[in-house]
Image (cartoon, rainbow, N blue to C red):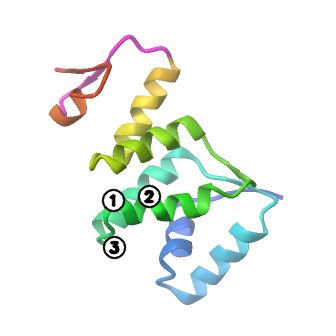
Amino acid sequence: MRVAIDTNVLVRYLTWDDEAQAQKAAAAIENAETLIIPLQVLCETAWVLKRLYRYGDQEIAAALRTVTDARSVQVNRPALETGLSLLSQGRDFADGVILAEADAAGADTLMTFDRAFASLSKATLL
């Protein structure tokens, strides 16, 4: 079966902070023939792990890799890799995803009010 998961399922699986829900999440994730992880779920998971669980950037990257490196996972790999690359530089995972999607869409520039994000290629500070 092809299964897409929501953020709360991925967070339960990675943190195992609620035994009953974590077991259900593990069963869904590990028994899926194909596991579909939307980019929004990865962005939200990175944010939740950082803000609520106080994970460091390397811990977040390792957690996301734990799930996404499986052969049965379907995810936008270029956006994932760009997000992980920025995360490894101490930047925001979601900014990497946004940058990758803008590049894939052929954007000439990316407008932002975020000064740190504007320092990235194709980003223009408004």
Image quarter where the N terminus lies is bottom right
Read off the magenta span: 106-114
Q: Residues within 10 Å of mark 2 (few under 14, many from 20)?
A: some
Circle nearer the N terminus (2, 3): 3
Q: Which residue is mark 3?
A: 53
- Where 24 sits versus 103, above or below? below
Q: Which residue is mark 1?
A: 57
Q: Quadrant of residue 107?
A: top left
Q: Could you tell me if the residues under marks 2 and 1 are in contact, i.e. CB atoms within 8 Å? A: yes
Of tags 3 and 1, the one toward the viewer is 1
Q: Is residue 2 left or right of residue 66?
A: right
Q: Is residue 126 left or right of residue 58?
A: left
Disc 3 from disc 1: Cα separation: 12 Å
Q: Amino acid at mark 3?
A: Tyr
Question: Is 113 contained in the magenta span?
Answer: yes
Residue 73 lies, in percent from the top left, at 69, 53
- Where 119 sits versus 58, above or below? above
Q: Residue at x 30, y 46 (%)?
A: 89
